[in-house]
Amino acid sequence: MKQKSTSQSAFFNMRVLIGLFVVLTGVFLAVVGFGTFSGLTASSAKAQQTHKIINVAGLPPGFDCATIHDLGIDKQENLRAGSIMIACGESPGGSATSFGAFSQLLNTVTAPLTYGGTDVDVITGTDTITHPTQSETYTLANPDNPNQIFVTYNDSRTASANYSGGSYSSDGGTTWTRLNPSPFASGHGTNFGDPVTLYNKPTSTFFAVFIATGCGGQGLGSWKSIDGGVTWTVGACVHTGGSDDRESGVADNNPSSPFFGRMYVSWNDFAVGGNLKVRYSTDNGATWPNERQLAPASPFIRDTQITVDKVTGDVYVAGMNEGGGGLAGPRSNKIYRSTDGGNTWTNTFTGANFAAPGRANCTANTYFVCMYSPDTWRHMGWGEPAAYNGVVSYVYAQHGAGSDAGDVEYIRSTDKGVTFSAPLKLNTDTTTRAQWQPNLSVSDTGTLFSMWYDERGTTTCSVGNPAVPCYQMFARKSTDNGVTWLADMAFSDVISPLPGQPDGTVQPNYQGDYDYGTADASNHYSSWDDGRVTISGQSQQDVFFDKEATGAGGGIPCGDLVSFQVRCKHNTGGDKLQAKLTLTNTSHSGQQVTITVDGNPNSVTINGNKATLSINGSLGQHTVELTAFLIFMLETQFTESS
């Protein structure tokens, strides 16, 4: 077994913050239909398969490989479908790569021009390079106790017996514990991933939902925890099905909502051709009998994600018409709405066609598009919706101008998802480097936060190579429910190498298909696929976490400042230089300020109405600066003497 080591391979990523808000135009689009592109789609060009019967543990006995296309297995994202593709010889499995010696360079982001705090790896313990893959995340905090945060994700460490994982934090995300063994590996047969995390407020219970063979062969199984995600018991089958895929879930935790406590799960049901469906529970997850169809099998509408309006209780599902797949297939977004707790649904919006993000069709499965040629990181433009008091927001990715493989776009509706604004590009870089796979969360006070993968700080990428930096997590925040947006800035602390996918039981183009972000009254929470941790000299997929306070980007007006004091504090272990910020109230708790000592920045989190830095200081004069998001800067000189 190999011990992980942290490779912070990268480079200073300097940026300039322009103090201008971008105002979203108030022009709204009527529903416009464009003609589809001509030519063969990825699915129509699929060659006729020859009959090949396979018997593989965890897969249906006597499976006929010639039925892969007819059953829609080549359109599915789950790891069971990937296992079938590999076993039938339609896709290779992942494989390890080798690199020579590399330097480990520290890559820091100049504070305070960043969102979030310190990145934390939620994958504790050790893995081997044979089965090291963790990605595709759903992050959620307990709204009644935000110190409890749970992340579900795909985890191949015990493949092919299980592909599920989870980590919990009991201190607001500062430290994490990965559940070992995974409690989701038992109770519902073999777990094939596709994670969902829910919290049911009436019963103070976390729920996890994954694809599981014990629920009809490839259905949706649930597990539940009443102690903040530390221990879990087996729950009900959300859906008993033979070919479920790409599920999403959300819970209505607003006590003022007419549907308080109701939980919803959406998915694609390929047992009937890929129909888009929703089920909901009215008894706190004990049963899930209420099933509704949102879209038929043709045209195929991918279940992107589901959300609930935090004020009204209306439920929204974002779907995507993938245009037959591949780069040639035009994409279009769909919004489905229920105003009666999931009982009835209306397709309220169909967006205009847009060009697919990505650089090439994935060679392992040409239905999907890869961000990196020939076969790394499949992505079709999927994003995440959010809703607050009748305003519906959605982010997604589309191809940029010229050779730009991806941009992140935002659209906004003020009439409950019927009409939407013209797209606003959230990434403001002037490069042709790609941005893709965004998420979006809305807080209990109507702030929005979008996170995405971003190459702007690099010029090239090399899969699995820890010496080549590739992407960084960037983000952008709105403090007025999407009307205006603050600057886009780095969210993760380093530029990550492009992680490989060396697990032979998983398709090589898998790097995680989504990262579901959430928020409460205090913070926006998100996790992502990060390659900075190496095993056997290779960058591989780990899940990292960070959070961003719901306030206005960390800005602190001068009127909230009481004092900033620097002094020498004597301790038994030696003298310390102590800098203390005191504010008038606790509204900025959780935000970051930077205290710079002699040119060396230190990021400090405000706790309550105070932020304190204590460091060893040599005798002599020191210059100490306090910076809070460029709203104010204070400088003081302090002389430490014996």
Image (cartoon, rainbow, N blue to C red):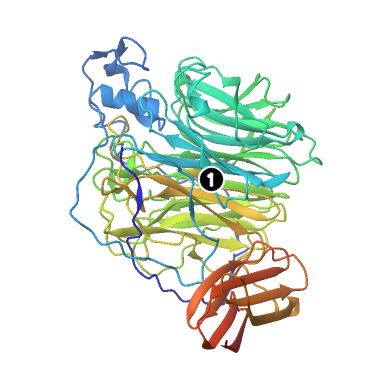
Farthest top residue? 62
Decide: is 521 above or below 154: below
Q: x and y percent of residue 30 in the render?
A: 58, 51
Q: Name the residue under label 1.
A: 176
Q: Which residue is drawn at 76% across and 33% down?
A: 202
Q: Is residue 112 visible?
A: no
Q: x and y percent of residue 129 in the render?
A: 29, 39
Identify the image quadrant of the C terminus.
bottom right
Decide: is 220 above or below 13: above
Give amino acid for label 1: Trp
Identify the image quadrant of the N terminus.
top left
Location of residue 204 by image quarter: top right
Q: x and y percent of residue 378 in the render?
A: 35, 42
The answer to which of 460 and 277 lies nearer the viewer is 460
Crowding at label 1, few (<14), some or many (≥20) Cα neighbours within 10 Å?
many
Would you say 610 lies left or right of 348 here?
Answer: right
